[in-house]
């Protein structure tokens, strides 16, 4: 960061010598005022022609062009986005359907006016530190408020609905009523799924309470197109004895916020968070009252597998993520069920072996338990599950029957060997040592030939 800021200052001095001014803009200024160190440094250059800026950049290093039609440059080996002021005119329904006009003499107010929210429309002179606040962004920061800059331009970009929700979640801010009203009227169907996933990822990985993201979209009436599985959770009842917090949506949001406190410990943090969101997707289709009036959702973990895959596929086709989440949704109830049933070690080893990421499955189970009103003490279960995970890891380090063992015993490669290795692995999970497992596997093969 120091290296980038030093380069920003060098750039600003050369721009000033040429008659222009350099400003920090966007999230970098916002984060600075909030006492945070933003990773992305955006600089806007006013008052000099693009050709002059290019000559200046060439004296400072190897110039890169990230968007020549947008007037966006960079310097190799530096994390700086260097742009010229520009205005944008909507040309179509899509998120990218804009005509862009680069105008270095546009002025700070008109340049800032194209920003989405007042807290992102702040500018700061790189050299003097002077803050430029045309739209009350500083006051909105103080009052923890997300408010749009311009009525006319805000509605031209439907992605701003998602951005409002994720900023509210990340910063624990309220969205201004007038901004909520605009967001509720916008059509999100033209957005690309990848952009939705980007905003979702920010909310899930940067917010302490990701539930704020979904609560905001719910109040806007904007869950239905991209998050129908989440919307379906609203009003789906749960057995009050086990879920006094209310419907499945309320429980899911509580689980999501609990998972956010655990994600740093996960092997795949994003996968953990999306699994927490998806874990009860199967409940709306499986929930019913039994003959005693008890509300049950039998098989919801199985029903949720295909729903989670559909949900992710709507936004991208990330194979690893879909496989991970499907596995977590399928198994999410079992870690907490085994202690309740008094299961033996073999059952734990089998479960952990079935999990794509055993440690992450236990984190999801913890979040699921704590995401219920009244479920506070998890220490005994967590201690037991941690011990079983350590036992499983130790077991996996011990020698197992492999293909070479079977070949040396005269078994030819093929389907028969695959079945034998699967049988030997089951023996390993039950605690058999290598030699015992090999002997029993060969005996099993011999019996199958009779």
Image (cartoon, helix red, strand yellow):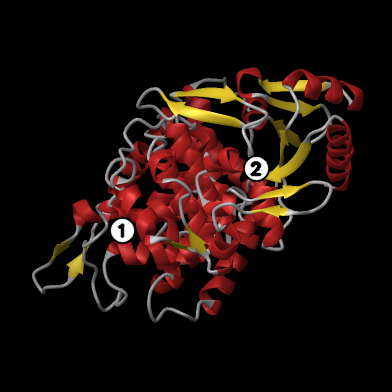
Pointer 1 or 2: first along the chain? 1
Say which residue appears at 46% left-offset and 56% top-offset: 147
**Residue 177 in the image, given as x and y percentages of width and height:** 36, 61
What residue sits right under mark 2 in the picture?
Answer: 400
| Quarter in which the C terminus is drawn | top left
Residue 179: mark: none
Q: In this view, does 102 lie above or below 164?
A: above
Say which residue appears at 53% left-offset and 27% top-offset: 417
- The one of 420 and 318 positioned closer to us in this rendering: 318
Q: Is residue 82 above or below residue 243?
A: above
Q: Is residue 311 among what the camera can see? A: yes
Label 1 packing within 10 angstroms: few (<14), some (14-19), many (20+): few
Disc tally is 2
Say which residue appears at 72% left-offset and 45% top-offset: 24
Q: Spatial distance from mark 1 to mark 2, Cα to Cα?
A: 55 Å
What residue sits right under mark 1 in the picture?
Answer: 219
């Amino acid at each position: 960061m120091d290296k980038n800021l030093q380069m920003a200052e060098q750039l600003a001095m050369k721009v000033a010598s040429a008659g222009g001014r350099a400003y920090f803009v966007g999230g970098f200024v916002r984060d600075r005022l909030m006492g945070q160190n933003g990773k992305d440094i955006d600089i806007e250059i006013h008052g000099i022609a693009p050709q002059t800026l290019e000559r200046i950049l060439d004296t400072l290093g190897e110039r890169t062009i990230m968007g020549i039609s947008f007037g966006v440059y960079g310097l190799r080996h530096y994390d700086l986005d260097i742009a010229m002021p520009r205005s944008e005119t909507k040309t179509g329904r899509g998120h990218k359907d804009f005509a862009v006009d680069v105008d270095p003499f546009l002025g700070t107010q008109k340049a800032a006016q194209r920003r989405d929210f007042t807290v992102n429309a702040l500018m700061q002179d790189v050299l003097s530190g002077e803050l430029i606040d045309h739209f009350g962004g500083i006051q909105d920061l103080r009052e923890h408020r997300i408010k749009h800059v311009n009525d006319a331009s805000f509605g031209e970009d439907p992605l701003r609905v998602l951005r409002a929700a994720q900023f509210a979640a990340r910063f624990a801010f309220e969205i201004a009523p007038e901004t909520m009203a605009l967001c509720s009227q916008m059509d999100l169907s033209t957005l690309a799924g990848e952009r939705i996933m980007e905003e979702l990822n920010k909310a899930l990985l940067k917010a302490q309470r990701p539930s704020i993201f979904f609560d905001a979209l719910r109040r806007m009436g904007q869950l239905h197109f991209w998050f129908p599985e989440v919307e379906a959770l609203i009003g789906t009842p749960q057995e009050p004895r086990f879920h006094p917090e209310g419907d499945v949506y309320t429980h899911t949001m509580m689980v999501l916020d609990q998972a956010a406190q655990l994600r740093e410990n996960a092997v795949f943090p994003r996968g953990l968070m999306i699994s927490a969101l998806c874990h009860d997707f199967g409940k709306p289709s499986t929930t019913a009252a039994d003959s005693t009036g008890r509300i049950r959702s039998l098989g919801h973990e199985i029903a949720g597998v295909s729903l989670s895959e559909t949900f992710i596929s709507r936004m991208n086709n990330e194979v690893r993520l879909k496989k991970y989440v499907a596995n977590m949704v399928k198994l999410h109830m079992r870690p907490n069920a085994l202690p309740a049933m008094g299961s033996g070690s073999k059952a734990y080893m089998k479960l952990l072996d079935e999990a794509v990421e055993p440690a992450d499955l236990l984190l999801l189970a913890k979040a699921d338990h704590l995401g219920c009103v009244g479920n506070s003490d998890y220490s005994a279960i967590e201690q037991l599950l941690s011990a079983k995970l350590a036992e499983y890891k130790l077991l996996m380090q011990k020698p197992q029957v492999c293909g070479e063992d079977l070949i040396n015993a005269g078994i030819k490669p093929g389907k028969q060997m695959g079945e034998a290795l699967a049988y030997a692995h089951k023996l390993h999970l039950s605690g058999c040592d290598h030699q015992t497992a090999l002997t029993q596997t060969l005996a099993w093969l011999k019996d199958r030939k009779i």
